Amino acid sequence: MQQWLWIGFAGAFGALARYSLTGFVQRLLGSSFPWGTFVVNVLGSFLFGLIWSLAEGRLALTPQTRTIVLTGFMGAFTTFSTFVFETGELIRDAQWTLALGNIALQVMVGLVCLFVGRIAGQQI
């Protein structure tokens, strides 16, 4: 039961971090493209790879702590469901180029950042 509470606490913190960063980026770059979600997903992919790598190598994280950080915080911080929703809205509005650009950018850059984070974690 205690782990559930920690995951919930970490998830709440991750959700608040996501909300804050997404809003900041959208205000900074405008709302014509879901830049806030893009930044959160790319940063989340990098951080997930970094934490994953560190947890397997240099940091002695218990399986419970790894679950709290990766499932709780990172699970709430990354916004895949929002990505799908916003892409669906672009498709609904017949903004095909923006929709396909959103898919390509987030998936490809996210994958690259996941592995860059992993490599960075191995170098620390």
Image: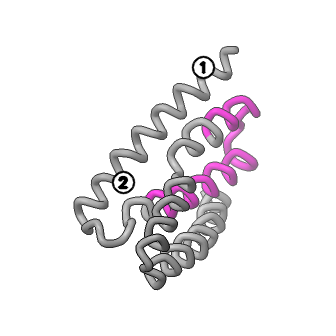
Task: Report the residue marked by disc 1.
Answer: 5
Towards the viewer: 118 or 109? 109
Residue 71 located within the stretch drawn in magenta:
no
Q: Which amino acid does label 1 sit on?
A: Leu
Residue 86 location (% of width, % of height): 46, 62
Question: What secondary structure is the magenta-colored segment mainly?
Answer: helix
Instruction: Describe residue 29's horizontal placement relative to residue 33 as left or right.
Output: left
Residue 59 located within the stretch drawn in magenta:
yes
In the image, residue 113 above or below residue 100: above
**Residue drawn where x is 66% and y is 15% of the image:** 2
Residue 60 location (% of width, % of height): 71, 37
Residue stretch rendered in magenta on the structure: 40-69
Crowdedness near tag 2: few (<14), some (14–19) or many (≥20) residues, C-alpha within 10 Å: many
Task: Report the residue marked by disc 2.
Answer: 22
Crowdedness near tag 1: few (<14), some (14–19) or many (≥20) residues, C-alpha within 10 Å: few
Instruction: Describe residue 84's horizontal placement relative to residue 62 as left or right.
Output: left
Position of the C terminus, as image quadrant, is bottom right
Q: Which amino acid does label 2 sit on?
A: Thr
In the image, residue 45 above or below residue 8: below
Residue 112 location (% of width, % of height): 61, 73
